[in-house]
Image: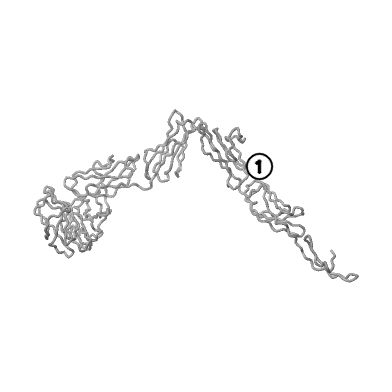
Amino acid sequence: MRGNEANRVISVPQGGLYHCRGGRGDPVYYTEDSSDVTVRETLPSKPTVTLQPFWTQIYSGETVTVRCEIQGGEGAQWTYEWRAAKLNTPPTSNEYRIIRATESDSGGYSCRGKRDYFFSEWSDIITLTVSYKPKAKLRADNTAVPVGGSVTLTCSVNPSSSSGWKYYWYRDEKSSEALTTQDAVFQSNGQISVSKEGLYRCRGGRGNPVYYTEDSQSVRIGKTVTASNRPVVTLYPNWSEIYRGETITVRCEIHGGDTEWDYEWETNSMIKAPNQNEYRIRSASSSNSGNYRCKGRMKRSQHETTEWSDSVTLTVSDNEPRPVLTVSPSWLSPGASVTLNCEVEHPSAGWSFYWYKAVPDLSEKSSSYELLPDGSGTAQDSYIIHGQTHTAGYVCRAGRGDPEYHTDHSQPKFVWSADVHSAASLTVSPDRVQHFTSDSVSLTCEGNFTEWRVRKFSEDGRLSVCRRMTGSTCDINTSKSDTAVYWCESGSGEFSSAVNITVQNDGNGPILVSPVHPVTEGASVSLSCSLRTQKILSNVFFYHNDKLIQNDPRGELKISAVSESDEGFYKCQYSGRESAQSWMSVKGEQDQNM
């Protein structure tokens, strides 16, 4: 291209290598050529990589074409460069056809165009994922065709993000011909309704040539027999809750006719039931908990089934049950009987009851249990003891089932006698039932035994053992929590009389000084009132069962000849402050000789 002074600046329409030179005179004298300047052509747009078919998720064996498109550059003669992990020798054409793809074809693909010396930008990367050949999944909303109805089957290919699938349906194992509209109602792509029994399967297909998934697992669709044959699930024994270790049978019952059945169970428990009409669970655990339902399949025609039964819920508790024992009365009186009651959860659920006497066992720091007369497996949850005269402890437990399952033993409960008897007794020093806080009190066990322990039953129901035993004596530095019933237990299993000790929490209040043990009818007794200073007070009012005994204050309450009517609760009042109340027992002369 020639130029002159006026055109030493030019415009060029296309890219390439450009240089120039100057010339003057006549003849023309030329300079040397300038250095080359590369002019790159700006493309209308950068390329785009597309997939045909446009599936970013494909499967091993499928065919896909990766194409590089340059918008606005259709008339130019381009060659192409590709970036892809697998392309050791990349093609120079605008498309790359992957036949029978494998996992190694997975990755990112990008391209650019080249013409003479000129390049486009690189396209954005498109990612292709190649996975193993998928298996279709078949789901049925019911596995038995109801009378006059149909069952809906749904076929799908995972992941759900994959697209382009058509579905093909088959019935029975040997059939390779897909179902048609004569065999099923095609509701939508991937869903059909069928009314014939049989073994169904499906697969997906897409592309050209068609690429097929693996067949789904087969689903057996049966035909529901009449509603009169609907099964019922029963539990035997029929207990709403059973406990770990018990035995229970889950049974499927189908009534009507002499048809022979195979059985099918459905349960959400962790352990699956066998395909028999009953499932015997031995040593049950919480993993057996769940809903159970069943259906029957005719032995002579496996495609004919009953409906599903209603579900029955089985609950297995890992918490071992422990009954609660109560005794009435807590304190013995002459001639009274003692009633024991054993309470369990779900009391109507087949329990029988076992009744025991608690025998002190000092070596084990606990008690052993001796079965009471006729106390084995009683149907009643109560047991009556006649003629009990001394302090005693009792426990119970319950059992049920075959083989019999037993609960834990209950906590021991005690019936107390305040009466002193010759075998074992408890003495208190100071000799009174009420004490102040921080008093030093000694409880001494007496009797012809070498080993002793002192038991304590607190107001809050706790049972404990004296921790400060010296020989046969328990030493207590009293606090409010020491208000309790105390008694002795010997190494030979004997119980002493019991004493109900009260600790006065009001440091400025009085205490009642009253006898520790029962008073014999006809004997005399004196009750007084004392402060922490151990001063016996003189200006005191006394109360019997909350009734003022006399209107004038006095120093002590003297009863010259005690009678049965004198038994009861006593308390004293001094300067407007009352003591706690304590029980004074009265025993007849005949009881003294027992």
The residue sitting at 38% across, 38% down in the picture is 236
Amino acid tagged 1: Val
Judge whether residue 470 can be spotted in this image.
no
Q: Nearer the viewer, residue 146 or 538?
A: 538
Q: How many marks?
A: 1
The residue wearing badge 1 is 210
Task: Residue 79 in the image: state x and y as whole percent.
Answer: 75, 55
Answer left or right for 223 relative to 460: right
**Viewer-nearest residue: 560 or 392:** 560
Which residue of the protein is positioned furthest toward the right in this rendering? 27
Residue 404 image offset from top left, x and y in percent: 33, 41
Q: Outermost residue toward the front?
A: 6
Identify the image quadrant of residue 559: bottom left
Which color scheme did the rendering employ for the protein?
A: one colour
Residue 16 seen by the camera: yes
Q: Is residue 533 left or right of residue 306?
A: left
Quarter of the figure with the N terminus: bottom right
Question: Which class describes the residues within 10 Å of circle 1: few (<14), some (14-19), or many (20+)?
Answer: few
Locate residue 209, reporting x and y percent: 67, 42
Q: Residue at x 40, y 45 (%)?
A: 285
Q: From the viewer's perspective, is residue 95 above or below residue 140?
A: below
Foreground pick, 538 / 132: 538
What residue do we see at 31% from left, 45% from top? 344
Q: Secondary structure at mark 1?
A: loop
Left or right for 560, reference 228: left
Q: Residue 313: give x, y in percent of width and height.
A: 41, 41
